[in-house]
Image (cartoon, helix red, strand yellow):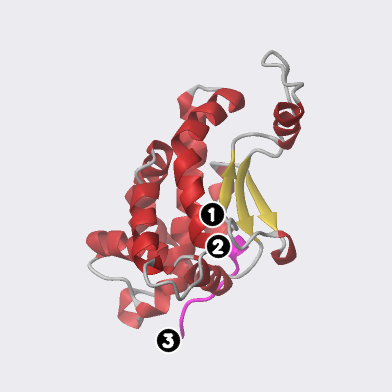
Amino acid sequence: MKEIIMAFRELIEILELDKIAPIHFQKLEDISKNNYVFFRYLGNEEKKALINGTHDENKRYDNSDLGVYLPDIDIKQCYIIETKRNPFSISYVNEQISYKMGCVWTKELYLVWSLYCALHEVGHWLDFVNSGKTSYEFSIMEKGYREEIDREAEMLYNMNDYFPQKRILAKEYVRKYYEIPSEKAANDYAFSNFVPALNEVREKLGYTTDDL
């Protein structure tokens, strides 16, 4: 059996994740390699108002662009982007999934990473909805948690790959990143739903672990 490769869209359709959270797909040329999978809790209209100083907490801003943003590519491309961006993220996820399944099959590496990304971002959406906070209130909370870690991310992104300490710093960054409360909530959802979701995909595609 060959490695599992499918469109990200197909993965979402199989699991019907678009019935749980608003899903937006971005073309490859429109995505940022530094942030290609993300959750938007603050709409562009409200964000612009905050930037230009006209924000009104009592105004109802357009929220049609809130939700989960995924790249409109296949899962192999998604995996490759992350290996270039921060391979320690993949190592961390594979380690966590291995605790639940015993191992991560080589032929499912692309599927495992992309499935985790999708479930993680849906977990962010549910965390936001269940918080009872407005987009503005949630953004203020998140800013407090993320200011320092965002600076570290920018530093690592701009650091030469051959800098001796980069691997150590990147690994420590991943650990601290997943300690952010909203990241922990998103991970709790992703990891608790991962095995049944993976089994659903396997069933839909018509294979079992015996084929791997």
Quick one: SS at disc 2? helix
Q: Residues within 10 Å of mark 2 (few under 14, many from 20)?
A: few
**Residue at mark 3:** 1
Choose the circle earlier in sequence order: 1 or 3. 3
Q: Residues within 10 Å of mark 1 (few under 14, many from 20)?
A: few
Q: Nearer the viewer, mark 1 or mark 3?
A: 1
List x then y, in percent, for residue 19. Answer: 57, 43
Say if the magenta span includes residue 72. Answer: no
Question: What is the C-alpha distance between the residues marked 3 and 2?
Answer: 39 Å
List x then y, in percent, for residue 112. Answer: 42, 66
**Residue at mark 2:** 158
Say if the magenta span includes residue 8. Answer: yes
Question: What is the C-alpha distance between the residues marked 1 and 3?
Answer: 40 Å
Asked if one can make out residue 15 in the rendered structure from this viewpoint, the answer is no
Quick one: SS at disc 1? helix
Q: Which residue lies at the image location 64% right of the left edge and 67% below the top edge?
A: 73
Q: Residues within 10 Å of mark 3 (few under 14, many from 20)?
A: few
Q: Is residue 123 above or below residue 33?
A: above
Quick one: SS at disc 3? loop
Q: Which residue lies at the image location 62% right of the left edge and 61% below the top edge?
A: 9
Which amino acid type is marked by label 3? Met
Q: Which residues are magenta?
A: 1-10
Q: Which residue lies at the image location 57% right of the left edge and 49% below the top edge?
A: 38
Which amino acid type is marked by label 2? Asn
Asked if one can make out residue 110 in the rendered structure from this viewpoint, the answer is yes
Q: Nearer the viewer, residue 93 or 119?
A: 93
**Residue at mark 1:** 154
